[in-house]
Amino acid sequence: MGMVIGVGALIVIVLLIGMLVSIYNRLVLLKNNINKAWSNIDVLLKQRHDELTKLLEVVKGYMKHEETVLTKVTEARTAFMNAGSVPQKAQASNMLTGALKSLFAVSENYPDLKADRSFAQFQNRISDLEDQIADRREFYNDSVNIYNIRIAQIPDVIMARMLGYSERDLFEVTEDDKRDVAIDFG
């Protein structure tokens, strides 16, 4: 009889240890899934940062170049209209001719369509990244939610407290993030 009780107690202890190992392993898996999900978001945020930098450089470069040429054309035109003497008009005319050559060169070498295509490509890339980030944020929140539920449920709560696991925050959008973005290329 004592042997049956001993074997029964041993079986209960083995089952209890097995259950604790199983709980521990599930909690570690959930914790690591959260860390992985955040790392995936972080990678996409870095890609978005890099793409935005490139996009802004394309826009700034295009706008700056266009602005410079148009400013030169406008200044030359104004100088020609305000010129009183023949030498002033000749100088203004040469200035206008040079500015127009620059404008024509720009339109041949960097047509609007090409610039717009570059902008559209960066814009599409950033939109794709935004979609991926949204998907990864959703996965992250799902992972955190499962983890938070698990560490609050019996018997996992006991192991979670022993390991010092605490509730994680969901990725939430702040009120500032909900507002429209003001974009200024000036």
Image (cartoon, rainbow, N blue to C red):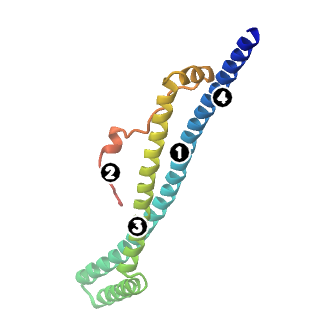
Spot occupied by residue 122 in the image (x, y as percentages of width and height): 43, 66
The CA distance from mark 3 to mark 2 is 17 Å
Q: Nearer the viewer, residue 89 or 61?
A: 61
Hey, what amino acid is under mark 1? Answer: Ala
Left or right: residue 163 compared with residue 117: right
- Verify CB contact (< 8 Å) between mark 4 and mark 2: no
Q: Residues within 10 Å of mark 3 (few under 14, many from 20)?
A: some
Give the spatial CA distance, label 3 vs label 4.
56 Å
Q: Tell me residue 111's x, y (percent).
A: 38, 82
Tag 1 or tag 4, which sits nearer the N-term? 4
Q: Which residue is mark 2?
A: 181
- Between discs 4 and 2, the one toward the N terminus: 4
Mark 1 or mark 2: which comes first in sequence?
1
Q: Residue furthest front?
A: 1
143 shown above or below 181: above
Residue designated by label 4: 21
Crowd band around label 1 with a 10 angstrom C-alpha radius: few (<14), some (14–19), many (20+): many
Occupied quadrant, residue 106: bottom left
Q: Which SS class for mark 2?
A: loop
Label for residue 59? 3
Q: Is residue 1 left or right of residue 93?
A: right
Residue 37 disc label: 1
Left or right: residue 82 versus residue 8 is left
